Amino acid sequence: MLKWVKTAAMAATGAMLAISSASAETVVNFAGYTGLFQDLYTKAVIEPFMKQNPDIKVVYFTPGNSAAILGALRAQKNAPQLDVAMMDITLAKAGTDEGLFAPIDETVSPHVADLYPMAKIPGVNAVGMTFDSLVLVYDKMVVKEKPDSWRALWDPAVEGKVALHATPDILGVALTIMLEKMAGGSDYNKNLDKGIEEMMTLAPHVLTWDPKPDLWGMIMAQQAAMGVGYNARAQVFADQPGSVLAASIPKEGTLFQINAVALVEDAPNAEAAKKFIDYMLSPEAQKAFTEAMFYAPTNSKAQVSPEALERTSAGQMENVLNVDWLAIAEIRDQVTQEWRRRVIPLSR
């Protein structure tokens, strides 16, 4: 009897310790992109962070793209459930204006001081966590020589086989900006008329404005021969066994798409969230994710391997357009209307 009592007491004590241990674990709810990004970011950044901080658990939520993440935050504004969120910089500005985000400065993370200037946008309570660049994505079985110009989209060899994203998707906006610059536009941050005119001549070559399942999948399945996408995903898919996909940064240059990280205003677990953001911006995490998925680092002190850096635009900063994404946000609706009225009706 006495032995049974001792055993029961030990079991009860163990259960209490387990409950105490579980209750001591702080959960940080993070909203990010789904699919390949989630898989690689979890392995390269989130799992090492949790290993270093066993008292913090990061739970990854995937509402969808940037707009969906912002929508989820808006729905929770009066009772936030998320602590940290990522999205493109223009929507981070919208969230800032709506009071959804707390400022991120050196009191949140000393690594903010080491971020490239492009990652710190005045008036935005978020900072750049990754840079991605615009590239030509193509089927190397169809396009035999690596294209070195955006003009390759007009090549007769890919006529009717071009897959593009239409505005308001940021890829459609970014291509219009690039073409505006090539056409001699005086200020591509305020006016994209020349870029839209260029798009009108490209439209007859386009197979689809809404690639499904996605641009990379269409090219790998040889349903499309060329398109415009982001470098990071293109590099990963190009490495897959038997892949026909390849990517090229043309001689006319490229532009960065900035993914920003934000601290939710009144986050339920703000202190743990700040610790997570600090790690996300650290040279260690930035190096790990660049080498995993070829996003260019935003921390200038990240010591990325030369092999990985060569596959990003970080080594070609002189060819990166200085795009004011907040100014572009002001004309995004107008550009979308012009696309719908003048560009898309000219497609096949």
Image: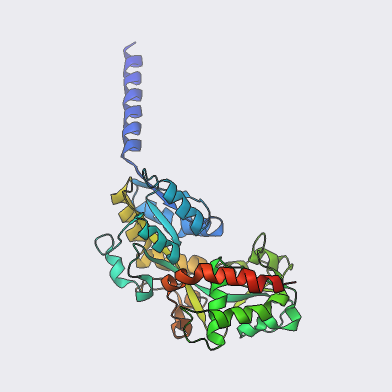
Is 123 positioned to the left or the right of 193 in the image? left
Measured as percent of width and height from the top left, residue 36 is found at 55, 59
Is 270 positioned to the left or the right of 210 in the image? left
Residue 333 to residue 136: above or below:
above
In front of the other: 88 or 344: 344
Residue 331 to residue 108: above or below:
below
- Quadrant assignment, res 120: bottom left
In which quadrant is the C terminus drawn? bottom right
Which residue is farthest bottom?
184
Which residue is farthest left?
107
Residue 28 to residue 196: above or below:
above
- Quadrant assignment, res 286: bottom left
Which residue is farthest top?
1
Measured as percent of width and height from the top left, residue 306 is found at 46, 78
- Quadrant assignment, res 4: top left
In which quadrant is the N terminus drawn? top left
